[in-house]
Image (spheres, rainbow, N blue to C red):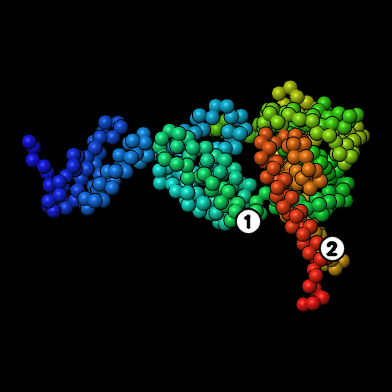
């Protein structure tokens, strides 16, 4: 019978364990899934055995020890993107742009196995506090990080997804401010349109923004609208396609337009026209007839686009956002001066984009309509939870405002205290 090996303290060493006198340390030798000899070191036998147990648990769980030690987040994101063959090119570009801009150089080189839940929380807070991102942009980052970690989980590289619940935690920290703050108030909405109406040279822009605010369409759906897509007699806007603008080749920064179906199947929808939207279309139609100027753009055989820029070409969505910034800054400068002269409270416009106008339209619907299914159909939300989240926020705000007003009227102790 073979004699048992012992350490200097007389403790029997298990199979694979040994004691190195020259370094005064314990060693555990094992073979990894690739057939390579690997070693674990520790100064204390109990610490070594804890590491042995963890290694055994990893092996029993089917974890790839090699990848667990070597794969960083950048590697896993590239692997995730290579599996998304069904993504539209515009969506794929947006995912890659978001990752490269906000994640790659920040935490991309960190080993996938080293991420903890708290790391994700701190990272999201860092994006908001240090880089000044809004919660909507952090949501976009979460949209690509969560499935990346989930793929690593399914590939048995990590035992759990550290992003699970992280975004919800951030929203709780913001105490419900996420989402609802993106909508313009009724007063701000009116101020913005009044500003455009006061300048005759901006009539094209005024018509475009009335349609955005009055339909809740995505910017790609509105810039892609053709006269063929609207029924002025029945007053219906048919949404059946979207126009995107992004680089077609990774090696080139040159962007091109492309026509694609709406973002989701629910995106194909008919939207009834409000009077303001109908009047905006009629105004644009009359203007184009009087001037003889129309959009000259042709995209994949499609022509007759309604809205166009000063070069008679279809709008670039980024150009529309730049116009919003230009107009709102000019408005705010004038409003601040006028408010001081008239000794009143200024109605200032916040920083907003085309997507905020979509959220504004949804907010107005939720404030005046209780049929959530109808709101979902008009908005084209693929998941009704998106609609319910916005509706719940609006109803909660309305409840607080109504209770505050009621409290002022029913303060039974105001004459006593």
Q: Position of residue 125 (x, y in %)?
A: 55, 54
Displayed quadrant of residue 219: top right
Q: Position of residue 173 (x, y in %)?
A: 58, 56
Report the residue at 19% width, 48% height from top: 26
Kindly state the secondary structure of the residue where label 2 is placed: helix
- Number of residue marks: 2
Pair 2/1: label in front: 1
Q: Does 227 sit left or right of 74 as displayed?
A: right
Q: Which residue is mark 1?
A: 175
Q: Does 270 sit left or right of 57 as displayed?
A: right
Report the residue at 55% width, 39% height from top: 144
Q: Position of residue 140 (x, y in %)?
A: 59, 43
Q: Is residue 417 visible?
A: yes
Kindly state the secondary structure of the residue where label 1 is placed: loop
- Quarter of the figure with the N terminus: top left
Q: Which mark is residue 338?
A: 2
């Amino acid at each position: 019978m073979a004699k048992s090996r012992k350490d200097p303290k007389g403790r029997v060493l298990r199979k694979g364990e040994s004691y190195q006198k020259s370094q005064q340390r314990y060693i555990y030798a094992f073979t990894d899934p690739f057939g390579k000899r690997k070693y674990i070191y520790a100064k204390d036998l109990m610490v070594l055995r804890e590491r042995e147990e963890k290694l055994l648990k990893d092996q029993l769980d089917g974890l790839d020890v090699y990848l667990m030690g070597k794969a960083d987040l950048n590697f896993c994101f590239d692997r995730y993107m290579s599996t998304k063959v069904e993504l539209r090119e515009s969506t794929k570009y947006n995912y890659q742009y978001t990752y490269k801009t906000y994640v790659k150089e920040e935490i991309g080189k960190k080993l996938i196995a080293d991420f903890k839940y708290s790391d994700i929380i701190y990272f999201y807070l860092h994006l908001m506090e240090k880089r000044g991102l809004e919660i909507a942009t952090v949501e976009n980052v979460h949209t690509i990080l969560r499935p990346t970690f989930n793929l690593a989980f399914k590939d048995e590289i990590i035992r759990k997804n550290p992003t699970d619940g992280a975004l919800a935690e951030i929203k709780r920290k913001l105490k419900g401010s996420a989402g609802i703050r993106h909508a313009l108030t009724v007063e701000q909405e009116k101020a913005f349109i009044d500003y455009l109406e006061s300048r005759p040279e901006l009539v094209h822009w005024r018509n475009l923004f009335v349609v955005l605010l009055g339909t809740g369409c995505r910017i790609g759906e509105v810039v892609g609208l053709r006269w063929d897509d609207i029924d002025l007699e029945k007053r219906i806007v048919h949404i059946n396609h979207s126009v995107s603008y992004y680089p077609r080749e990774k090696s080139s920064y040159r962007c091109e337009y492309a026509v694609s179906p709406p973002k989701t199947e629910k995106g194909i929808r008919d939207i009834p026209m409000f009077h303001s939207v109908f009047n905006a279309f009629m105004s644009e139609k009359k203007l184009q007839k009087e001037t003889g100027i129309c959009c000259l753009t042709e995209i994949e055989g499609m022509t007759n686009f309604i809205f166009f820029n000063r070069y008679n070409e279809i709008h670039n969505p980024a150009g529309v956002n730049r116009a919003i910034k230009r107009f709102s800054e000019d408005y705010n400068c004038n409003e601040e001066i006028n408010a001081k002269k008239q000794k009143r409270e200024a109605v200032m416009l916040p920083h907003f984009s085309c997507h905020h106008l979509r959220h504004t339209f949804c907010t107005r619907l939720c404030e005046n309509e209780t049929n959530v299914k109808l709101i979902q159909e008009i908005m084209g939300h693929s998941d009704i939870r998106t609609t319910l989240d916005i509706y719940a926020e609006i109803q909660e705000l309305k409840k607080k405002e109504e209770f505050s007003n009621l409290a002022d009227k029913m303060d039974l102790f105001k004459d006593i205290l």
